[in-house]
Image (cartoon, rainbow, N blue to C red):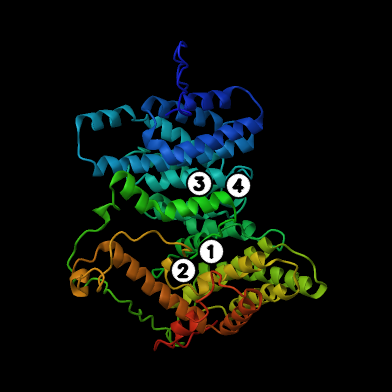
């Protein structure tokens, strides 16, 4: 790969040598220039790794990885963070390289090129060691957790990242022994993902299983999962719930739709358009359609998930709900302390008309939603919900929503606050997409001429998993909206949307979702403790 096209020589001049753009980037990184210049070169390198890793020559790949490992031990936290992000992109790229190796027909040239790009086992061992040792540093906590999660998530396959299992278990044991004292500084999204994956790995080893990593994580949460108006919890709804599910070991999980807010800028618009037109562009330029490898024809049987969404009978009569266990009670107590502190601060904001940013309001809503979804998840798994925590969650959301009336936020900022409530009303992941990709194959119907029963007989496994996830999402939303004090939240949020957002926004069309959820003959008597 090169930095750009070499200009044609003028008549009578010699042809100039083509420069190597990646080598120039690596030289700029190690040339001892300013920190800003080094970070800029790392950002460009991250873009190249993310978009063109499979096209880079094997010798350049080895040089890139060696340079990034050296930067991972830098004294500058900012450089360390960008080096960790580049290393995570390398792991992600190697995963696709392994998939290409499996899906491509074996050939002499392809196999020889794969052998040339093989890395030493000490390379991944070094990356794993550097990342786990920097997780407890506040300045590099998030980026280091991102690399560690990428490695540990890729390790079970072992195709392109040959990280020994004993090294993974040894570092997890070392992390668990000091987690409550020297754990991650904040519950970032990558930290939640890494810890949840550590629990899954520890449960497969007898020695780590006896250490009760879940209890150590709860002890870490007591000191670090703290939220205030000026410092809310920095993880998303999905990441936080995934960690809580792993700690509690629930069998019925949450599949609520949670999407990040896309910034309003030219780069985001270009990337969104590029993603939307990807199928058309690949078909016109490369004569390629989406890979058929994900569509495996299977026969539907009685044991398989039906093509329609059926509710799962959870049996949540008040007499059938069990009291929560020790771990669940400790987590509820942590959330209760956080919400009480946040509620007092927001009452002061509303009474004294103190100015706060819309980002703080959105993060506060996320904190309340995590507590509300967690209690609903307990009911979904046959345990009683904490009535006081449910009331505190809805009270905090109502306090933030009421602040829309007297705030100085513009329409876009108010829409972003209401956007945080989307997980409570979205029923399908496709509804969360502002612009979906072009459909390459027509669905069954009059337009395609495919009969529905023929289509369902060829239904693939991916669709079966999607139907199962949608069924569980519907049941969990049903429980959430039947909890006490939650319906008032729905009516207030819709009234605020109609008042402040006169035009169509991302919440348009979803205000009837809770009514559609509750219209099914599923009216559990939700117990409380």
Contact (Cβ within 8 Å) of mark 2 with mark 1: yes
Residue 146: image tag: 3
Horizontal arrangement in the rendering, residue 416 relative to residue 202 (left or right)? right
Secondary structure of the residue carrying tag 1 is: helix
Which class describes the residues within 10 Å of circle 4: few (<14), some (14-19), or many (20+)?
A: some
What residue would you read off at disc 2? Answer: 256
Label 3 or label 2, whichever lies nearer to me, is: 2
| Residue 236 sits in quarter | bottom right
Q: Residue at x 58, y 49 (%)?
A: 183
Question: Nearer the N terminus, badge 1 or badge 3?
Answer: 3
Q: Residues within 10 Å of mark 2 (few under 14, many from 20)?
A: many
Q: Could you tell me which residue is drawn at 59 percent across and 59 percent down?
A: 221
Return the x and y of residue 194 as percentages of the image width and height.
Answer: 48, 51
Residue that carries the numbered disc 4 in the rendered image = 182
Residue 348 seen by the camera = yes
Labels 4 and 3: the sequence-earlier one: 3
Q: Nearer the viewer, mark 4 or mark 3?
A: 3
How far apart marks 2 and 4 lie (CA) works out to: 32 Å
Badge 1 vs badge 3, beta-carbon distance below 8 Å: no
Which mark identifies residue 237? 1
Could you say which is closer to the camera, residue 500 or residue 316? 500
CB within 8 Å, label 4 to label 1: no
| Badge 4 or badge 1: first in the primary sequence | 4
The quarter in which the N terminus is drawn is top left
Q: Position of residue 82 (x, y in %)?
A: 56, 38
The Cα–Cα distance between marks 3 and 2, rounded to whole angstroms, is: 23 Å
What distance separates the C-alpha of mark 4 from that of mark 3? 18 Å
Q: Do tag 2 and tag 4 residues touch (Cβ < 8 Å)? A: no
The spot of residue 386 in percent (x, y) is: 56, 78
> Which mark sits nearer the N-terminus, 3 or 2?
3
* Most foreground residue, 246 or 373: 373
Question: Element type at marker 2?
Answer: loop
């Amino acid at each position: 790969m090169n930095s750009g096209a070499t200009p044609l020589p003028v008549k009578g001049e010699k042809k100039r040598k083509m420069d190597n753009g990646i080598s120039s980037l690596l030289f700029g990184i190690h040339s001892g220039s300013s920190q800003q210049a080094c970070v800029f070169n790392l950002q460009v390198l991250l873009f190249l790794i993310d978009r063109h890793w499979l096209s880079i020559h094997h010798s350049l790949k080895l040089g890139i990885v060696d340079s990034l490992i050296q930067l991972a031990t830098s004294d500058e936290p900012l450089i360390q963070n960008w080096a960790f992000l580049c290393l995570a992109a390398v792991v992600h790229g190697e995963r696709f390289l392994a998939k290409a190796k499996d899906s491509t027909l074996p050939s002499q040239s392809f196999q020889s090129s794969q052998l040339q790009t093989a890395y030493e086992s000490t390379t991944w061992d070094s990356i794993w060691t550097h990342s786990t040792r920097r997780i407890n540093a506040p300045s590099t906590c998030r980026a280091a957790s991102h690399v560690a999660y990428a490695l540990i998530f890729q390790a079970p396959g072992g195709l392109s990242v040959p990280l020994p299992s004993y090294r993974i278990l040894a570092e997890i044991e070392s992390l668990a022994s000091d987690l409550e004292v020297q754990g991650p500084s904040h519950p970032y999204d990558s930290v939640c993902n890494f810890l949840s994956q550590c629990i899954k790995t520890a449960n497969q080893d007898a020695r780590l299983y006896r250490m009760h990593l879940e209890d150590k994580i709860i002890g870490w949460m007591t000191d670090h999962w703290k939220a205030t108006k000026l410092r809310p919890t920095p993880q998303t709804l999905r990441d936080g719930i995934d960690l809580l599910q792993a700690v509690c070991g629930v069998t019925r999980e949450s599949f609520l739709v949670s999407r990040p807010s896309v910034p309003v800028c030219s780069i985001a618009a270009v990337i969104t358009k590029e993603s939307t037109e990807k199928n058309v562009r690949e078909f016109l330029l490369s004569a390629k359609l989406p890979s058929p490898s994900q569509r495996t024809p299977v026969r539907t049987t009685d044991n398989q998930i039906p093509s329609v969404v059926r509710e799962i009978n959870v049996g949540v009569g008040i007499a059938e709900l069990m009291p929560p266990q020790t771990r669940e009670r400790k987590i509820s107590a942590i959330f209760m302390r956080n919400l009480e502190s946040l509620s007092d601060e927001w009452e002061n904001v509303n009474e004294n008309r103190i100015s706060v940013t819309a980002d703080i309001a959105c993060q506060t809503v996320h904190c309340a939603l995590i507590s509300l979804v967690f209690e609903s998840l307990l009911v979904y798994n046959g345990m009683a919900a904490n009535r006081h925590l449910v009331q505190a969650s809805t009270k905090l959301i109502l306090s933030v929503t009421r602040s829309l009336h007297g705030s100085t936020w513009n329409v876009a900022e108010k829409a972003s606050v209401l956007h945080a409530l989307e997980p409570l009303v979205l029923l399908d992941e496709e509804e969360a997409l502002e612009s979906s990709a072009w459909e390459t194959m027509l669905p069954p119907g009059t337009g395609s001429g495919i009969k529905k029963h023929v289509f369902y007989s060829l239904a693939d496994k991916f669709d079966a998993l999607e139907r199962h996830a949608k069924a569980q999402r519907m049941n969990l939303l049903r429980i959430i909206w039947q909890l006490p004090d939650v319906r008032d939240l729905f009516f207030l949020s819709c009234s605020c949307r109609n008042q402040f957002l006169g035009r169509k926004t991302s919440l348009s069309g979803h205000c009837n979702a809770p009514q559609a959820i509750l219209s099914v003959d599923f009216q559990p008597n939700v117990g409380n403790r």
